[in-house]
Amino acid sequence: MKNLKQKLATGKAVLGLFMASGCTAVTEIAAGVGYDFLILDGEHGQCDENSIFQQLCAMRSYSSVGLVRIPAFRHEYVKRMLDYGADGILSPMIEDAAQAQAFALSMRYPPDGNRGMTGIFRASDYNNDFDDYYAKVNETLLCAAQIESVKGVENVDEIAAVKGIDLLFIGHSDLSSDYGCYKQFTDPRMLAAEERIFQAARRNGKFVGMVLRPGMDLDEYVKRGVNFICLGTDLGLIKKTFKDTLAL
């Protein structure tokens, strides 16, 4: 079982990508390159359940941690992705403490949560390694809540205080849209929202993550407390490479 929280706890930046293509070969290549984590995108990407399963299988022999962004918080989405072998879940649009608590509980077996129990499933190597998996999994899995609305920012202190939420992920695009300043990430409202999220995370001992957008300074955000950083998407990198190659 891979434990990204151990890396995050060192304070060093961990770097990854959103995998939106749904292509197993692309994910396997990215894992082999050595990204700390890959987020299989079931919200905006072309990843369906079968492709997520196949991508997680392809990542098994690599050190990259396999996370899944579910389409929306629903207990059954969390349960299935964890049984497939995801090392953590990113849930979009967490807006209050009640949602955050329901999400955190769905990630963990009783008595710490309400995750359903089964025997034969991929995460425990089809029951060949269940005892070890069961002993460690409640502490190991990464539970990441995406803060991407004005309401989420307003309630971020309560969200961050929820036991079991490990990381607050800033959704800059949706958040800027909700503030009426789409992609204007230096707008004073966006900077104030970021700072409010950073402070809530510090007060409650949570990690902070985000996508590094063009023009954003990596070192500056690391200094401000962000150490879970997505460098883009597989589709974006593929498109850039295609364009760059054609321009030669």
Image (cartoon, rainbow, N blue to C red):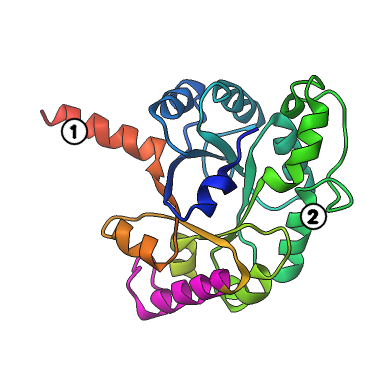
Query: For residue 218, which quarter of the picture?
Result: bottom left
Q: Is residue 8 magenta?
A: no
Q: Which residue type does callout 2 highlight?
A: Leu
Q: Is tag 2's residue or tag 1's residue first in the polypeptide sequence?
A: 2
Q: Quadrant of residue 95?
A: bottom right
The N terminus, quarter of image: top right
Q: Majority secondary structure of the magenta segment? A: helix
Q: Which labelled disc corresponds to residue 137?
A: none
Q: Position of residue 237 (x, y in %)?
A: 33, 37
Decide: is 135 above or below 142: above
Dot 2: element:
helix
User: Who's the residue at 73% across and 29% down the image?
Assistant: 123
Quadrant location of the C terminus in the rendered image: top left
> Farthest left residue?
248
Q: Can you give x and y, in whole percent of width and height, for residue 77 in the image?
A: 73, 43
Start-end of magenta stretch: 180-202
Q: Is residue 14 visible?
A: yes
Q: Which residue is mark 2?
A: 105
Residue at 64% across / 68% down in the picture?
160
Query: In the visual, does 162 lie left or right of 19?
Result: right
Residue behind mark 1: 244
Could you tell me the amino acid type at mark 1? Asp
> As rendered, which of 220 and 86 lies closer to the eye?
220
Q: Give percent across and percent down for residue 210.
A: 45, 56
* Label 1 crowd (10 A; few <14 / some 14-19 / many >=20): few
Is-magenta flag for residue 189?
Answer: yes
Gap in angstroms between the C-alphas marked 2 and 1? 46 Å
